[in-house]
């Protein structure tokens, strides 16, 4: 059974940083392209970015609201993908989900709540 | 960026009746080299991550009841629930994966009338 297990989120002050992790199991992780999506309270889904598998180049793409502030990394030896969030703003407060990026996103993590507030 | 527009924003349907959700993309999602539309549908229940229902615009994911169906091509797509069940109360999203950023529709809330 494929599982994506995310680390806990947390409370961060504006301008601060936080790193989320997402560990995969039951899948060939090093072949997987992985994405991050967030959902602000009461709002819709917002795609943040994606990292390709290393065999596909390992490159990243980001959505405009987080480009230059967020970085997606992967460590295939740990079967884990990370979302490094820098220069956080109150409007970044949301539940953050990792997911597999294929023909649609079949597998999702459980979500991590991030609150950016002073 | 490709803009995805869903309608209606919310929908109330009687149990056993049909629910229809529309999704329009600002660019064609059909790739002629493989004859596929790069469009997925998700169901999200309160407090849960989204669940993939449909991919390639009309392929039902494993374990998804056959009352869910997807149709359409190019820029216009539809998700149909043929006979609404109580457990189908949720928000439904379309998403294009033709290119990045992979954009979502704004969601359609389905409720029981």
Image (tube, coloured by chain):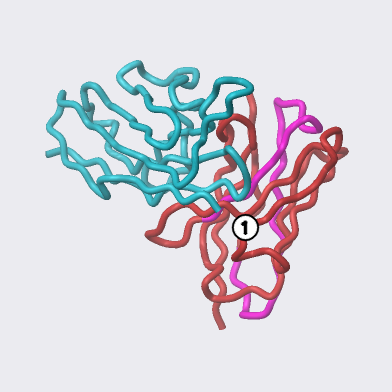
Chain colours: A red, B cyan
The magenta span reads A10-38
- From the viewer's side, name the closer residue of A8 and B82: B82
Q: Quadrant of residue B79?
A: top left
Residue A6 relative to residue B14: left or right: right
Instruction: Give the mark count.
Output: 1
The C terminus of chain A: image quadrant: bottom right
The image shows residue B58 at horizontal and vertical percentages of: 43, 22
Where is the N terminus of chain A found, in terms of image quarters? top right
Residue at 54%, 75% in the rendered image: A90
Secondary structure of residue under mark 1: loop
Q: Residue at x 43, y 43 (%)?
A: B25
Observer-nearest residue: A78 or A64? Answer: A64
Is disc 1 surrounded by few (<14), some (14 to 19) or many (20+) residues within 10 Å? some
What's the residue at 78%, 30% (across, down)?
A: A31
Q: Is residue A14 magenta?
A: yes
Q: Which residue is mark 1?
A: A63
Query: x and y percent of residue A77 in the render?
Result: 88, 38
Left or right, residue B18 beside residue A4 = left
Q: Is residue B90 magenta?
A: no
- From the viewer's perspective, is residue A10 above or below residue B107? below
When asked about the image quadrant of residue A85, the answer is: bottom right
Q: Chain of mark 1?
A: A
Q: Is residue A107 above or below residue B4?
A: above
Viewer-proximal residue, A48 or B7? B7
């Amino acid at each position: 059974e494929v599982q994506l297990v995310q680390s806990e989120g947390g409370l961060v002050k504006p301008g601060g940083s936080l790193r989320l992790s997402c560990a995969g199991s039951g899948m060939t992780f090093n072949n997987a392209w992985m994405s991050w999506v967030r959902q602000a309270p009461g709002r819709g889904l917002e795609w943040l970015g994606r990292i390709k598998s290393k065999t596909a180049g390992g490159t990243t793409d980001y959505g405009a609201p987080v480009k230059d502030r967020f970085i997606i990394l992967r460590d295939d030896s740990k079967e884990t993908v990370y979302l490094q969030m820098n220069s956080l703003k109150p409007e970044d407060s949301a539940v953050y989900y990792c997911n597999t990026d294929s023909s649609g996103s079949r597998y999702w993590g459980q979500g991590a709540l991030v609150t950016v507030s002073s | 960026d490709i803009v995805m527009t869903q309608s209606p924003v919310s929908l109330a349907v009687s149990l056993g009746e049909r629910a229809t959700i529309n999704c329009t993309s600002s660019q064609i999602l059909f790739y002629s080299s493989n004859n596929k539309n790069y469009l997925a549908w998700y169901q999200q229940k309160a407090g849960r991550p989204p669940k993939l229902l449909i991919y390639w615009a009309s392929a039902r994911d494993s374990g998804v009841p056959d009352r869910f169906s997807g149709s359409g091509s190019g820029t216009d797509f539809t998700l149909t629930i043929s006979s609404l069940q109580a457990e189908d109360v949720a928000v439904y999203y379309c998403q294009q994966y033709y290119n990045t950023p992979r954009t979502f529709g704004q969601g359609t809330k389905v409720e029981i009338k």
